[in-house]
Image (spheres, helix red, strand yellow):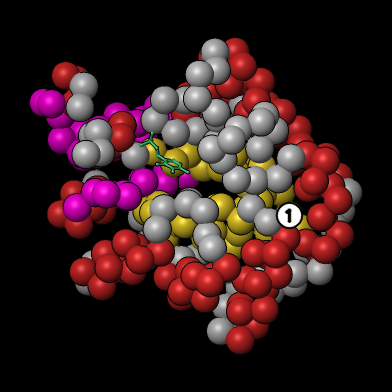
Amino acid sequence: MSSSQLFTTISDRIATIRQQLPETVRLIAVSKQVSVEAMREAYAAGIRDFGESRVQEAAAKQSQLQDLPDISWHLIGHLQTNKAKKALEHFQWIHSLDSLKLAQALDRLATSLSTNPQVLLQVKLLPDPNKYGWTEEELFQDLPALNQCQNIQIKGLMTIAPQNLTEGEILSLFQNTRSLAAKIQQQNWSHIQMQHLSMGMSEDYDLAVQAGATMVRLGRTLFGERS
Ligand SMILES: *Cc1c(COP(=O)(O)O)cnc(C)c1O
């Protein structure tokens, strides 16, 4: 935890960040490895969107936070097909949709569960061995098949900047992601919308906002370092 965080509370940090963000940007509080007590504090400070990387962890927290209404749960971590059903039962948003195979699995399950989850396509415009996602070329190949997945609501793109880039490189990456969304939108797919860009984490959210992010995913800067 940085020294500036030692003497501030979660609600102070949320208020500070909220002031820095344009009103239209949705603040997703990334609560992986964060206690439900800290999440209650965030809720009291106005947070209604929580991001979790693991389905199991989110499910456990949801059962402890049942008394809090109006929360939207966002899955931001890689999802294996065998957990897709559970993911649909526990999340309203899936930011980490990263393959056609997973999209088709979610689409089939969404029909049987009578749900229409909101999803973002995770893209990787720079090579990153640690990250999942489509390259631009792969995504254009898969768009016709994704457009057939009519039970999931494809709402935009998500990206994660690789480690060790300069600020200039991160900004270009986010701008290129925004341009890609615009290109896709121009193709006028019937079941693919590009209204949202989920990009920006604690270290780079200011650059993401500059580049047009509509959702930022913040963990450490709200809750402190994870152990
Ligand atoms: C952990 C995580 C975040 C939050 O990262 P911080 O650096 O704690 O803000 C955002 N997005 C994804 C995909 C993550 O896995």
Left or right, 215 with respect to 56, comes to right
Q: Is residue 24 visible?
A: no
- Placement of 94 over or under 11, stated as above or below: below
- Foreground pick, 192 / 203: 203
Figure quadrant of residue 19: top left
Residue at disc 1, secondary structure: strand
How packed mark 1 is, by other alpha carbons closer than 10 Å (few <14, some 14-19, many 20 or more), is many
- Highlighted magenta segment, given as a residue range: 6-35
Q: Picture coordinates of residue 140 (x, y %)?
A: 84, 47
> Closest to the observer: 224 or 135?
135
Residue sitting at 66 percent across and 31 percent down? 127
For residue 159, say whether it is visible.
Answer: yes
Count the numbered circles shown: 1
Q: Quadrant of ligand 1?
A: top left
| Residue 108 vertical position relative to residue 200 in the rendered view, above or below | below
Looking at the image, the residue that sits furthest to the bottom is: 112
Q: Find residue 180 and report its horizontal and vertical position in percent.
A: 76, 37
Residue 39 point in image, percent of width and height: 23, 52
156 sits to left or right of 52: right
Q: Which residue is mark 1?
A: 193
Q: Which residue is found at the position 64% from the left and 53% from the top?
A: 98
- Give yes or no for residue 29 being in the magenta stretch: yes
Question: Which quarter of the picture shows residue 1?
Answer: top left
Q: Amino acid at mark 1?
A: Gln
Q: Residue at x 47, y 57 (%)?
A: 75
